[in-house]
Amino acid sequence: MATINLGSIKFNWKGTYGGGTPYVVDDVVEYNGSSYICIQASTGNLPTDTAYFEQMSSAGTNGTDGTDLTTTLTTQGDLVYRDGSGLQRLGAGTSGQVLQTGGTGANPSWTDIAGGTVKQIVFAQNNSTTNTTSSSFVTTNFGVNITKQSATSKILLLANVNIQLSGSSGRWTIYRDNATNIASISGADEVQTSENANAHNPATGIMIDEATLSTGTYNYTIYFRNSSGSNTTYFNPTNQTVNSLIAVEYEV
């Protein structure tokens, strides 16, 4: 009766091929990333010699078909994507950026978040009283300081001001650093109160500083005037109403 070696019914994994190792039928070795099975016992014959080995599986090309990404991804934060020819590395973007697709047939990329991002909000309020008969703008000494974080951002200003008039209309606006009329820069009109004499006229204004400003601290102050120059315009005449000024830094 024939003797059957049960150990030879299955493949025998021998690991990496060695030139001095004898191999017998059904031994399996790894060579240059591919696997080969021995079909004829021998020693010193490479697995690529088809008289002694048959190929079982083939190695891919490292970094292009997913078998080995270590040569493609080199730095923490790297991403991998496929371009027109194979796998490619996309290095980490800058802090705060988001991944953006270029659509069909294009590569992804990092991009800045779209405009409208609020960076900071600074709020101030005031209930002091002052008045003027001047037809030129004078300061109320009520303002807010904001330290601009980005050279590409803009400053949005929202103010609520209480004015009392005596015989003619009053107007107010916002100056930057007591020198530049923001209303003129933005193209907006000055905020005009009612023509009614002795009326209390809370008025809300929204202005945007359109100038290109570097990073740093800026002061925004409310200025006011009398339209005729012969009557009196009061800023917060009752000394009770709280005026407010809000500065918002945002990315366009």
Image (cartoon, rainbow, N blue to C red):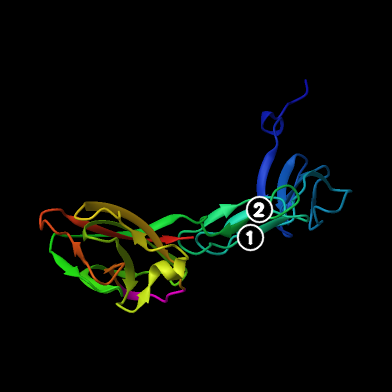
Snapshot quadrant of residue 220: bottom left
Amino acid carrying label 2: it is: Tyr
Q: Is residue 5 above or below residue 241?
A: above
Q: Residue 113: x and y, percent?
A: 51, 56
Q: Is residue 231 visible?
A: yes
Q: Secondary structure at mark 1?
A: strand
223 left or right, relative to 70? left
The foreground one among 150 and 47 is 150
Amino acid carrying label 1: it is: Arg
Residue at image mark 2: 81
Residue lying farthest to the right in this orientation:
51
- Image quadrant containing the N terminus: top right
Mark 1 neighbour density, 10 Å: few (under 14) some (14–19) many (20 or more): some
Q: Residue at x 24, y 71 (%)?
A: 230
Q: Residue 49: x and y, percent?
A: 86, 53
Q: Residue 85: x and y, percent?
A: 78, 56
Residues in magenta, as a range = 212-218
Q: Residue at x 79, y 58 (%)?
A: 44
The answer to whether residue 215 is magenta is yes
Residue at image mark 1: 89
The foreground one among 10 and 194 is 194
32 left or right, relative to 215? right
The answer to whether residue 179 is magenta is no
Snapshot quadrant of residue 144: bottom left
Mark 2 neighbour density, 10 Å: few (under 14) some (14–19) many (20 or more): few
Q: Secondary structure at mark 2?
A: strand
Q: Is residue 63 visible?
A: no
Q: Earlier in the sequence, mark 2 or mark 1?
A: 2
Q: Is residue 142 above or below residue 60?
A: below
45 left or right, relative to 149? right
